[in-house]
Amino acid sequence: MSVDPAIAAMLAQAKSRSAGSIWDVSIETMRTGYRERYRERSAVPCAAVNRRSITVETGSGTIPVVIYTPEEARRPLPLMVYFHGGGFVLGDDAAYERQTSNLAIGCECAVAFVEYRKAPEFKFPTAVDDAISATRHLARRRRELGFDEGRLVVIGDSAGANLAINVASSEIGGKVDLLCLLYPVVDLRPYVGLETPSTSDTTFSTGYGLDFDHMRFFAHQYLPNSMAATDVRASPIVGARSLRQPPTLVFSARNDVLFDQAKEFVGLVQSGSLDIQHIVLEGMIHNFMGHVGISSIASDYFKQICHSLYARIH
């Protein structure tokens, strides 16, 4: 599959300075590198955004949530709860600050960035529990926080999309008006040897940003054991036919190990007669939302996603 030339150049540069196997790099070094690269490749916000931090009680401790609101926007704003990617291991507000700001601006909404607890320090299902607790807390406090009580969006990218599905499938899901999944992780079984790798797993196994071996590493860090991958919370595709979730938009990168599982997930959800749309973005690789600063095509897709969300929530 063809890759956007700007992203292909980025991949070539990354290959030239590769540090070797992901299994040989410390978690902290990995997190620092992810944070620096994500911010570096993101676009500088085009307008002013207010940023405030709150804490959320999860039942087993507190987690931070950072709320972004565009200065120039109509009030009250819809609330969008965002769960970041990074294989349940990497990613934080510092990495995503520019992207989250641009999402708030482009969608004219408040974006609550949830700093859920990550693996390997906190294994599955801690991140799932944090995501549900944070959304419940934010939904309950919408009036107090100054947001529109009638419009709630849950969105996530990659591993964060997995958490977003869990939120939408939980008891709080009835309050969610729209679910948006960006290149979602919906099946961890192939990465622990419990399912045969898909065609996209093999076609894009190396050299496209997210390698098959990276997914093996993340699954190993996140799951307490291999059989946990069969839990519907770890692999939502297991229960996709019986999911009850709000109207859903799924955006996939065509050149991504996760492409086939997202496509299969959408088909299974549709077989349950739920409202779900699958939009395939050509030329893109995994994590394209974080490539807006280096690729004009990724930037155009980012705007397309914002436009789609804006049309649904305003």
Image (tube, helix red, strand yellow):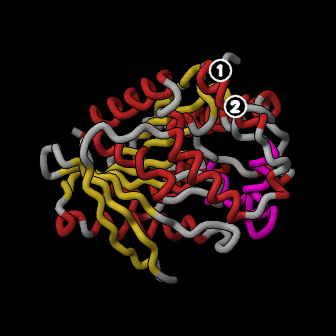
Neighbor class of circle 1 (other Cα within 10 Å; few <14, some 14-19, many 20+) is some
User: For the C terminus, which image quadrant?
Assistant: top left
Marks 2 and 1, the one that precedes in the sequence: 1
Q: Residue at x 74, y 58 (%)?
A: 229
Residue 219 counted in the magenta span: yes
Q: Amino acid at mark 2?
A: Leu
Please name which of the two marks, 2 or 1, marks the residue nearer to the observer. 2
Q: Where residue 27 sits: x, y (%)?
A: 72, 64
Q: Residue at x 55, y 65 (%)?
A: 128
Residue assigned mark 1: 3
Q: Nearer the viewer, residue 261 or 2?
A: 2
Q: Where residue 25 sits: x, y (%)?
A: 79, 58
Quick one: SS at disc 2? helix
Tell whether label 1 touches label 2 (CB within 8 Å): yes
Neighbor class of circle 2 (other Cα within 10 Å; few <14, some 14-19, many 20+) is some
Residue 21 counted in the magenta span: no
Q: Is residue 132 left or right of 153 when viewed as pictured?
A: right
User: For the N terminus, which image quadrant?
Assistant: top right
Which labelled disc corresponds to residue 11? Answer: 2
Q: Which residues are magenta?
A: 212-236
Q: Nearer the viewer, residue 133 or 36?
A: 36
Q: Amino acid at mark 1?
A: Val
